[in-house]
Image (cartoon, rainbow, N blue to C red):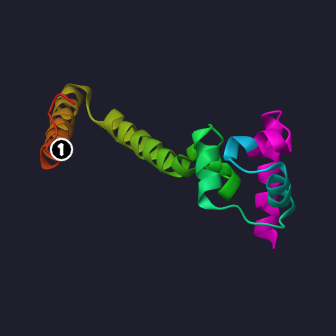
Amino acid sequence: MILQDEFCSRLRAARKKLGLTQAEFGSLAGVTHGSQSRFEKGQQKPGLEYLSNLAEAGVDVNFILTGKHPADFRSNDNDQNHQQMREWISILEKVPEEKRLHAIQVTRSTIIFLVEEWQESRGMDKNS
């Protein structure tokens, strides 16, 4: 029941954030005022068409369903990637200056090679 209550609360919050009445919000999604009211009270569950219509109208359906925005799904990966890059830079800073440029050039060449190989495996143009 907690998940349903959270869904109903987020659905209501999304509507209010847009400054719409239940009738107006329901109209965006192709349902009546009564159906919208029942969705927000947890008395009726909306279908996929309803959610699809909301998404097409620009409503953040991911947030309504999960409580997370799209950026939240990527943040852990981005944080981990940034941490790895910081570690790499820290290691690179320990390389003697006269060898650092060579290490950067080798790394750059390796990255370019890997990207081109990945693009080729997917039939993509190397300039994409």
Q: Which residue is mark 1?
A: 114
Q: Is residue 16 magenta?
A: yes
Q: Which region shows up in magenta?
A: 1-26
- What x and y, as percent, mark residue 117? 13, 45
- What x and y, as percent, mark residue 78? 48, 44
- What x and y, as percent, mark residue 122? 17, 48
Comparing 71 with 56, the one in front is 56
Q: Is residue 89 magenta?
A: no
In the picture, measured across the screen, residue 75 lies left or right of residue 34, that is: left
Which quadrant: the N terminus?
bottom right
In the picture, measured across the screen, residue 65 lies left or right of residue 122, that is: right
Residue 126 visible in rendering: yes
Which quadrant: the C terminus?
top left
Comparing 43 with 9, the one in front is 43
The mark total stands at: 1
Depicted 114 relative to depicted 44: above or below: above
Q: Residue at x 40, y 38 (%)?
A: 90
Q: Residue at x 86, y 39 (%)?
A: 21
Comparing 66 with 46, the one in front is 46
Task: Tell me the amino acid under the disc marked 1.
Answer: Leu
Residue 69 visible in rendering: no
In the picture, measured across the screen, residue 41 lies left or right of residue 90, that is: right
Within-10-Å neighbours for mark 1: few <14, some 14–19, many 20+? few
Depicted 91 relative to depicted 9: above or below: above
Comparing 7 with 110, the one in front is 7
Q: Residue at x 83, y 43 (%)?
A: 23
Where on the picture, by quarter, is residue 56?
top right
What secondary structure is found at the residue carrying circle 1? helix
Where on the picture, by quarter, is residue 95?
top left
Q: Main SS type for the magenta part?
A: helix
